[in-house]
Image (cartoon, helix red, strand yellow):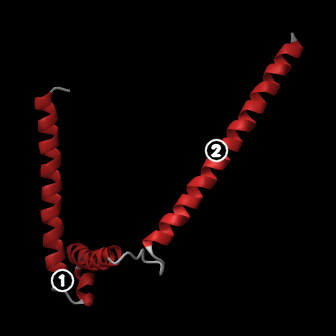
Amino acid sequence: MDSERFMRFMAAWALVHETADDGWKAAVARGSGQEPTEMKEGPEAFVDGLSAMIAEEKERLKTELAEGRDGSGGTTGALAEKLDGLTFEMGELRGRIETLQASIDALAAAADVDRR
């Protein structure tokens, strides 16, 4: 892909996201002015109300993350430790699977030799 086509692709990507962002902001603004019962007035009202609710939750999430919390009552540090532990365990399992595969391959090769 030449640089002109790449730049054109990236410009199109940016335009799509900008348009979607404008639509999102407009839906949030419309939904923020709604009463909860107004969400039943049709698909557009539902999407607007839902967008406003999601935007509120997004702001809560941003606050939690800025404060170092992960939303589960723990800290992001505790979550990172858990993820590190899981990563280690996954590595151990991967090693065991590779060992089993090597054993199976050796047994299969030995069986082929015996058949000849």
Q: Is residue 78 above or below residue 15?
A: below
Residue at which label 2 appears: 94
Depicted 64 relative to depicted 84: above or below: below
Residue type indicated by callout 1? Ser
Query: In the rendered image, which quarter contains the N terminus?
Result: top left
Q: Please tell me how many numbered marks the rendered image carries.
A: 2
Question: Quick one: SS at disc 1?
Answer: helix
Is 61 on the left-hand or right-hand side of 43?
right
Q: Position of residue 76 (x, y in %)?
A: 43, 71
Whether residue 4 is situated above or below residue 21 in the rendered picture = above
Q: Residue type at mark 2? A: Arg
Give residue 26's position: percent from left, percent from top: 13, 71
The image quarter in which residue 61 lies: bottom left
Q: Percent x, y for residue 21?
A: 16, 62
Q: Are marks 1 and 2 in contact (CB under 8 Å)?
A: no
Left or right of residue 112, residue 65 in this image: left
Which residue is rendered at x = 13% and y = 57% of the image?
18
**The C terminus lies in quadrant:** top right
Residue drawn where x is 67% and y is 48% of the image: 93
Name, please, the residue furthest toward the top.
116
Q: Residue at x 11, y 37 (%)?
A: 8
- Residue plotted at (78% across, 25% down): 106
Does 11 sit left or right of 62 as displayed? left
Task: Using the image, tell me which numbered label, if any, was put on residue 32.
Answer: 1
Q: SS class of the residue under badge 2?
A: helix
Of discs 1 and 2, which sits in the foreground?
2
Mark 1 or 2, nearer chain start: 1
**Residue 66, percent across and down?**
31, 74
Left-right relation of 93 to 111: left
